[in-house]
């Protein structure tokens, strides 16, 4: 089917249809352009999302990415970057292969369409001119024929009239002949123009218009094919990136499969292992009958049985030690004496209790109760040494448990060794450059490098001294820790990210089941009392406020750790009343405070004082 033969009279409709086709093409171009903008925006959002969750440099987040689950998440973020890159590729390819090409094609199509319809209008104008000429010659021929007929009639009338002269008759005859000749000429001209018009009209409807319409048809068909090809390209651009997107997704799956829960659990051990051993069993304390228990002057631990030796700070025993030890102050802060209070003398006054203090309805284990009260009263104090220093981390990392301290010191030694090696390489480079200057003085002055060489050598010496200092601390810590295999040491170094620590000077708030804080004593520390390291750590502790006063009913000789001696009739301040264990904490002055049996004093509490409670 050809538009030239079938639509020979639909010039205006074809013009509208082809314009509609161009509009459709431009609409498709706009669609693809908006798709590319969406792809770019999506890629940008994906990149921003991946960047948002990337670990920040030199932050705690970087340490978290030692775990396999976090590594898998980091791989997912990296793959999302590549995934976003493929969407950028889609946008770029659609822009170059579809949007740009179709935009150029639309401009060419508009020019071609304009050319064809210009030729069509030109042919229309030509045939219209021919038609006008034909009409003009036809009217002239008609007019001349009428004039010739009137002239003939006039001649015949004149010729029949006997009153008209011959001259008038002859004149009328000549006039009729002229009109007749003009009619013949008009007839010939009309016939010629008519033949020409018929020829032009035939050419117009059978040659010019069919050819023009055929070209327009071909143009329109090319447009349809082109938009179809563009749609195929549209799909192909997406298909080309599917394998790469599939690889990104495969890498995400691979990263997920690489997650090792056992390895992460081991990392947690390496990160938070303190190096302490768990405390031993707590001995049963029988309050049903008075009994005396032997307590070491320097330890809070009870002997484990009659046949067992008493635990001491010195020696090579494996006893558990309290890291917080301060005579008459810190120990009284943590706990009341372990012994039950002695009964009052036989001459007890009516206000005294003959058989010792009354047990509370809900008996609590004194040591853990006191320790828990101390820990909850100051929940933010993790390290007394760091508190005294305003929270600054000690240079030797003594604020951390042994295992963590060892790891941190090892990390510091490794960093210093790297810096030393870097400075040594720089020194070697300067030395070589100086040798070159000595051999070729025109290249530079060798003396100009002496200052730099001296500076580098001094830096190396400083770093070595620093490294030796940390190595000494590391050797000290490793000497106190249990024996570790070389493989375990290397494995610990691989996961080195948390700040290590020691308990020699300060310790974190780690409470054992019996409320004690213990560390294993080193063989090198034989005969030394670790508690002395803490003697100066609590000098600035604020004293507890007085909640009342008391009067001593009897004289009490405080011979055990944490107790204080009083004389009968003496008046003292109460800073902590009996909590059910039979002991009351009192203060004589700012430097003297401790526990006395509740039955030995008569307490007068200030009801308005904070914390004033009666445990009965």
Image (cartoon, helix red, strand yellow):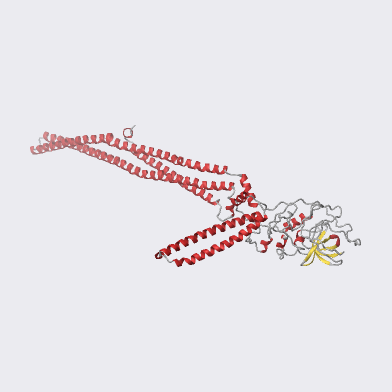
Answer whether residue 164 is visible to the viewer in this image: no
Picture quarter with the N terminus: top left
Q: Tell me which corner region of the image, top left, top right, bottom left or bottom right, holds residue 542.
A: bottom right
Q: Nearer the viewer, residue 299 or 354?
A: 299
Vertical arrangement, residue 554 with respect to residue 240, above or below? below
Residue 126 horizontal side relative to residue 153, left or right: right
Residue 307 horizontal side relative to residue 508, left or right: right
Answer whether residue 270 is visible to the viewer in this image: yes
Residue 111 horizontal side relative to residue 544, left or right: left
Percent coordinates x, y for residue 231 in the rendering? 42, 39
Percent coordinates x, y for residue 437 in the rendering? 43, 64
Vertical arrangement, residue 112 with respect to residue 513, above or below? above
Percent coordinates x, y for residue 593 in the rendering? 79, 64
Q: Nearer the viewer, residue 295 or 91?
A: 295
Hey, which residue is sitting farthest left in the picture?
166
Task: Please tell me which residue is depicted at 86% across the width and 59% down the height of the picture.
Answer: 342
Hey, which residue is sitting farthest top in the picture?
1
Picture quarter with the C terminus: bottom right
Hey, which residue is sitting farthest right in the picture?
347
Q: Tell me which corner region of the image, top left, top right, bottom left or bottom right, holds residue 446.
A: bottom left
Q: Nearer the viewer, residue 610 or 576?
A: 576
Percent coordinates x, y for residue 394 in the rendering? 64, 61
Q: Tell me which corner region of the image, top left, top right, bottom left or bottom right, holds residue 141.
A: top left
Please give the count of numbered marks on the rendered protein: 0
Residue 286 horizontal side relative to residue 233, left or right: right
């Amino acid at each position: 089917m050809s538009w030239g033969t079938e639509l020979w009279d639909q010039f205006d409709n074809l013009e509208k249809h082809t314009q509609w086709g161009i509009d459709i093409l431009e609409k498709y171009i706009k669609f693809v352009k908006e798709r590319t903008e969406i792809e770019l925006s999506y890629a940008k959002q994906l990149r921003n999302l991946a960047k948002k969750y990337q670990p920040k440099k030199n932050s705690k987040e970087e340490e978290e990415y030692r775990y396999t689950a976090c590594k898998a998440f980091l791989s997912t973020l990296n793959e999302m970057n590549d995934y976003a890159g493929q969407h950028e590729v889609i946008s770029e390819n659609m822009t170059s292969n579809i949007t740009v090409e179709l935009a150029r094609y639309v401009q060419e199509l508009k020019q071609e369409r304009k050319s064809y319809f210009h030729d069509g209008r030109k042919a229309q104008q030509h045939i219209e001119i021919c038609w006008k000429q034909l009409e003009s010659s036809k009217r002239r021929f008609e007019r001349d024929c009428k004039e010739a007929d009137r002239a003939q009639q006039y001649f015949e009338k004149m010729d029949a009239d006997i009153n008209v002269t011959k001259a008038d008759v002859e004149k009328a005859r000549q006039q009729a002949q002229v009109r007749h000749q003009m009619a013949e000429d008009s007839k010939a001209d009309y016939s010629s123009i008519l033949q020409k018009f018929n020829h032009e009209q035939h050419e117009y409807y059978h040659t010019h218009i069919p050819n023009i319409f055929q070209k327009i048809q071909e143009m329109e068909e090319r447009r349809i094919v082109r938009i179809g090809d563009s749609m195929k390209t549209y799909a192909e651009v997406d298909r080309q990136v599917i394998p790469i997107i599939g690889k990104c997704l495969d890498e995400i799956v691979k990263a997920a499969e690489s997650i090792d829960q056992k390895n992460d659990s081991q990392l947690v051990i390496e990160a938070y292992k303190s190096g302490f051993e768990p405390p031993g069993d707590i001995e049963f304390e029988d309050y049903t009958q008075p009994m005396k228990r032997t307590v070491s002057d320097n330890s809070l631990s009870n002997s484990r049985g009659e046949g067992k030796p008493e635990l001491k700070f010195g020696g090579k025993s494996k006893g558990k030690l309290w890291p917080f030890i301060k005579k008459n102050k810190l120990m009284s802060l943590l706990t009341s004496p372990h012994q039950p209070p002695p009964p009052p003398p036989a001459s007890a006054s009516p206000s005294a209790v003959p058989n010792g203090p009354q047990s509370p309805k809900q008996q609590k284990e004194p040591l853990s109760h006191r320790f828990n009260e101390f820990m909850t009263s100051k929940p933010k104090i993790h390290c007394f040494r760091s508190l005294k220093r305003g929270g600054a981390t000690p240079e030797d990392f003594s604020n951390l448990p042994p295992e963590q301290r060892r790891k941190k010191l090892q990390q510091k030694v490794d960093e210093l060794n790297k810096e030393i090696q870097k400075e040594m390489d720089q020194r070697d480079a300067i030395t070589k450059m100086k040798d070159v200057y000595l051999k070729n003085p025109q290249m530079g002055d060798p003396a100009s490098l002496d200052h730099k060489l001296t500076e580098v050598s001094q830096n190396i010496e400083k770093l070595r001294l620093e490294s030796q200092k940390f190595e000494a601390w590391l050797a000290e810590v490793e000497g106190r820790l249990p024996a570790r295999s070389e493989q375990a040491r290397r494995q610990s170094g691989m996961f080195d990210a948390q700040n290590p620590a020691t308990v020699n000077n300060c310790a974190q708030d780690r409470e054992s089941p019996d409320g004690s804080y213990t560390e294993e004593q080193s063989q090198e520390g034989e005969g030394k009392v670790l508690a002395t390291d803490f003697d100066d750590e609590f000098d600035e502790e604020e004293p507890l406020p007085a909640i009342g006063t008391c009067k001593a009913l009897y004289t009490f000789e405080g011979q055990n750790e944490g107790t204080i001696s009083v004389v009968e009739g003496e008046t003292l301040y109460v800073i902590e009343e009996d909590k059910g264990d039979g002991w009351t904490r009192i203060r004589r002055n700012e430097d003297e405070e401790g526990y006395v049996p509740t039955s030995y004093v008569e307490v007068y509490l200030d009801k308005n004082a904070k914390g004033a409670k009666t445990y009965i």
